Image: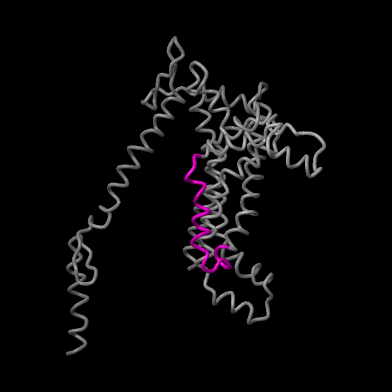
Amino acid sequence: MGSEAATAVPKARRRAGEGGGARISGVLYPRWYWPSFAGPATIWLVLLFVLPFYVVFAVAFGTSDLFGNALPVYQPWYWSGSTFTAILDRFYGGDAFYQPALVRTLVYVPAASLLCLILGYGVAYYVARHSGRRKGLYLVLLISPFWISYLMRIYAWQGLLQPDGLINRILTQLHVISSPVSWLQGRPTTVVLGLVYGYIPYMILPLFGFLDRIDQNLLEAGRDLGAGPFKTFVRVTLPLSRQAILAGMVIVALPMFGDYFTNDLLGSTKTSMYGNLIDNALSLPGGSPQAASLVLMLLVLLIVPLLYYLRSTKRAQEAL
């Protein structure tokens, strides 16, 4: 008798859910109830991302009028790939004068991202594990660069790196250099360090968030098994923070690929990057189709590491 009563409730709940609803904790919800919460965000995403991105396709595969103004073509069956093919030839064809900027980007961005990881991991590890009661203060200091425009901060470095700027004066007084260095005359080191300075907070914050959530008992278990501090870090902390490293690299590297004003302010045409190609194309008469084609090529370039990150994240969630 008792077992029949116990099985009657689940059966009644299953029958109640057969009409298209879902019963949670004794409450019957319609099938559309929970998906409806994503409705406003979906509409917002369609209006502010999907539609503008479709316009980029329409411009890239569209035409231009007699004055060089872009004429978007919104019907895919009328699209023309002439502009896209011409831009592609500038990377790999006989007249590949876009290729050096692409190569520099593929060198500068990984170098700057790796420096962000090396410097940012140490800062994030200290704040998460050893800052104690000052953790809140350090977090405020880490977020404080966002209070000032990135453009203004790069302008400040432009003044510091002048031949008579503070950096040259300090290095000269310390006898590190014998004469002022022209840091702003197209030096790759300056551009890479400028990228590191501008984007390193985006690396530190996700690293801190992951490191701060690592269970302290796991670290103590490693020490109890005879592992020293270094081996515990290599065997426990570093593997557990793998997803944080991937997240930080993606967050930092993606905007770097489209960055152009860092080189505009700290470099020259000798250190131009992919983002400078897009910016220069927009400044030319009738250059909108070229700029749109460059954006689509950049998308193809970045989709591979982004898919790898999504796949790695999915596997990490499934392993939990």
Query: Most extreme residue toward the front, as rendered?
Result: 173
Relative height, residue 242 to residue 270 (above, below): below
Counting the numbered discs, the total is 0
Q: Position of residue 97 (x, y in %)?
A: 66, 24
48 in magenta: no
Is 269 placed above or below 249 here? Answer: above
Q: Residue at x 59, y 63 (%)?
A: 125
6 lies left or right of 260: left
Query: Residue at 75% across / 42% down in the picture?
Result: 171
- Please state if 68 lies on the left or on the right of 239 as rendered: left
Q: Nearer the viewer, residue 180 or 173?
A: 173
Q: Position of residue 112 (x, y in %)?
A: 64, 45
In terms of image quadrants, where is residue 71?
top left
Q: Residue at x 69, y 75 (%)?
A: 228
Secondary structure mostly seen in the magenta stretch: helix
Magenta segment, which residues? 127-149
- Residue 199 versus residue 211 in the image, above or below: above
| Left or right side of 25 for 188 | right
x and y percentages locating residue 12 in the rendered image: 17, 73
State how the image is colored. Answer: one colour
- On screen, residue 151 above or below 240: above
Q: Nearer the viewer, residue 172 or 262?
A: 172
Outermost residue, top direction?
A: 66
Is 133 contained in the magenta span?
Answer: yes
Residue 266 placed where, x, y %? 63, 33
